[in-house]
Image (cartoon, rainbow, N blue to C red):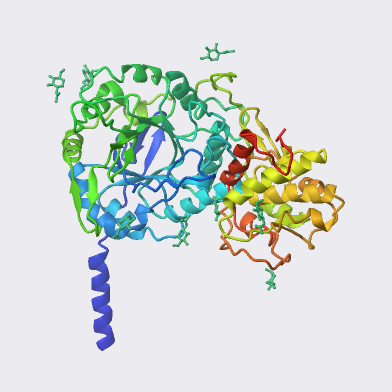
Amino acid sequence: MFWARVLAATSLLALALVPPIAALPKVSRTGRYLYTEDGNRFFIKGIAYQTQGLIVSGPDNPLNAPSTFVDNLADGAACTRDLPFFQKLGINAIRAYAANSSLDHDSCMSTLTGAGIYVILDLTLPLNGSIDTTLPAWGTNTLDQYLRTIDAFEKYDNVLAYNIGNEAITPSATQSAPFIMAAARDIRAYLNSISSSALVAYASIDGSSDFVDNVADFLACDRSADSPTASIDLFGLNNYEWCGNASITTFDGLNSRFADYGVAAYFSEFGSENCSPNPRVWTEIPVMFNSSMTDVWSGGCAFSYFPDISRGHQFGMATPSADNSTISTNADFDNLAAQFNAVTFVNSPAKASVTTIAPAACPTANASAWPVSETLPPTPNDAACACLANALSCVFQPTNPDYMVLVGELIGIACGLLGQMGGTCADISASGETGVYGTVGMCDPTIRLSYIFSQYYEASHRAPTACSFSGNATINSGAGAEGASAAVTSCIPSPSAVFTPSPPPVLIPVAPTSSTNHSGSTSGGASTGGSGMRAPLSARGILAGIICVAAGCMGGGMLWTFA
Ligand SMILES: *[C@@H]1O[C@H](CO)[C@@H](O)[C@H](O)[C@H]1NC(C)=O
Ligand SMILES: *[C@@H]1O[C@H](CO)[C@@H](O)[C@H](O)[C@H]1NC(C)=O
Ligand SMILES: *[C@@H]1O[C@H](CO)[C@@H](O)[C@H](O)[C@H]1NC(C)=O
Ligand SMILES: *[C@@H]1O[C@H](CO)[C@@H](O)[C@H](O)[C@H]1NC(C)=O
Ligand SMILES: *[C@@H]1O[C@H](CO)[C@@H](O)[C@H](O)[C@H]1NC(C)=O
Ligand SMILES: *[C@@H]1O[C@H](CO)[C@@H](O)[C@H](O)[C@H]1NC(C)=O
Ligand SMILES: *[C@@H]1O[C@H](CO)[C@@H](O)[C@H](O)[C@H]1NC(C)=O
Ligand SMILES: *[C@@H]1O[C@H](CO)[C@@H](O)[C@H](O)[C@H]1NC(C)=O
């Protein structure tokens, strides 16, 4: 009886705490429009929901981007606190910029879904958690981070889209475009394989019309000659063109440029500061949701809910108290709420009447304006890279867990030494300009480094002193005698293969150690590869090495080159 009562009370409590919530209708793309399952058009009426990270300067952060992040979707109490403000704004979506796949997001996601709010989630993390702007790669480490995040979020019914990058392609550095496109291709294939309806999206920085049009077209152009074909579903433009009480013709130029765009598009950020009148009046909203724009655009996300200072201006509208228990809002917030609540969605065209627009030809490569190859890098292959890692004769041995920058320095040094012996680092390089992708360029940066260590060690007739790199490398006695080049051929027989990625390997925590153990498993990917291959490392570390070279630094006494 006692137990029965307790059980009854518990289940009542459970019912009270978790009221049955009708799943949010899935949103899918038909041509350039988004529709909910009932056939109504779907527009994003959203806000950026991301605590601003701290900028920590250093060799791994040449662009001075935020280096730390808060996973706001893992803070259930904060989501509950913020829900009434979301409801005041009348939003149906938030954009979150960073999530840690090992944290629990149930509370926040359930709060949001219960209120009819979808989530647009960036798969990227700061620094080495993103495809690098100036030295891009599409490697197993980044792919696996993206897949882990998808795996953590796929159980929720309110994930609208996954962003595979934010402002990675810039007007002065376009070479990441093929890597972003390859990421979109592989993430699309993975989502298909798990029957996910989430959209694949990208959020672009604004710029000259040539630049923006090239980026938008590149990510959705005619790749029917490729197998598989690939396109993003949702192009986001971080657009701050509208300033204050601007003219309703402000977006006319943009609208006509996108008049024939084949996939859905929205403003992934909007809301200029430092305009007149101030505070912001958000008069772009009645224009954005008017029929003059809805034939091209599917809404946007106002920037930003949380305080966010950019170029000296405060974009935040809702400030948490010191103890995070309450929120205070400003006039920007009230004005935004008034404009958002006045929006009526234009429910046309009818889904059945949509004629899809054929994708445009891919932008023509142009040495000055668009130095970008149409050839995409391959799908990063965990198993192939793990096989290689285990077969390498001289492997990177990190002595502390924060070895991201060190990997960059060591690649500079090792490539310099290898160059002195007539070798090159071409196998670990990848160029979005030429479309030439070295066979090992898709592997985790630690494996790329070990590959160069091994080539140098082998070229030095395996003299033990040639596998030290001041204590950063160790001989892998478990490797056979075949050598690094032969190992590449046997482990990576199809270097340009494009395929549907498998669920990512289980992440083994980084545990730098001075002991060697070469009996590790050969399956399961980079992070579980040979013992010398600890956790995934990133392009950021390599970047540090390259910047040094670009500035005239010497690696191991020699200027080295990737060519
Ligand atoms: C994710 O959260 C776990 C658990 O708190 C933490 O150990 C890990 O460092 C976090 N990962 C990132 C990338 O912040
Ligand atoms: C915005 O501009 C319109 C037309 O130029 C004007 O009538 C209106 O007063 C302006 N509003 C503000 C708040 O400046
Ligand atoms: C809405 O669209 C109509 C038809 O294109 C146009 O005449 C009107 O000026 C637009 N209004 C706004 C606020 O953009
Ligand atoms: C308030 O929340 C922010 C964002 O999650 C967090 O960084 C900060 O440490 C919190 N402050 C307190 C006092 O809990
Ligand atoms: C490259 O693009 C720029 C800007 O669109 C154009 O002015 C230039 O003529 C182009 N160059 C070539 C070789 O096509
Ligand atoms: C590893 O390489 C770095 C960079 O060259 C060097 O400073 C360090 O002394 C080396 N050895 C160890 C054990 O980290
Ligand atoms: C070496 O790795 C193997 C396989 O992972 C494991 O069984 C063994 O206990 C390890 N040995 C040491 C000394 O860590
Ligand atoms: C970034 O570098 C850190 C080590 O500094 C590593 O733990 C993490 O896994 C790396 N992330 C990726 C995606 O490479």
In the image shown, does 216 or 1 lie closer to the viewer? 216
The residue located at (28%, 56%) in the rendering is 78
The residue located at (34%, 41%) in the rendering is 37
Judged left or right of residue 420, residue 369 is left
Displayed quadrant of residue 425: top right
Up-down: is 390 above or below 445? below
Up-down: is 48 above or below 289? below
Give coordinates of residue 501: x percent, y percent.
Answer: 59, 47
Q: Quadrant of the C terminus?
A: top right
Give coordinates of residue 511: x percent, y percent.
Answer: 59, 64
Asked if residue 337 shows in the view, the reply is yes
In what quadrant does ligand 3 lie?
A: top left
Up-down: is 95 above or below 399? above
In the image shown, does 287 or 269 lie closer to the viewer? 269
Count of number-bearing discs: 0
Judged left or right of residue 366, residue 473 is right
Up-down: is 560 above or below 86? above
Give coordinates of residue 335: x percent, y percent.
Answer: 17, 36
Displayed quadrant of residue 207: top left
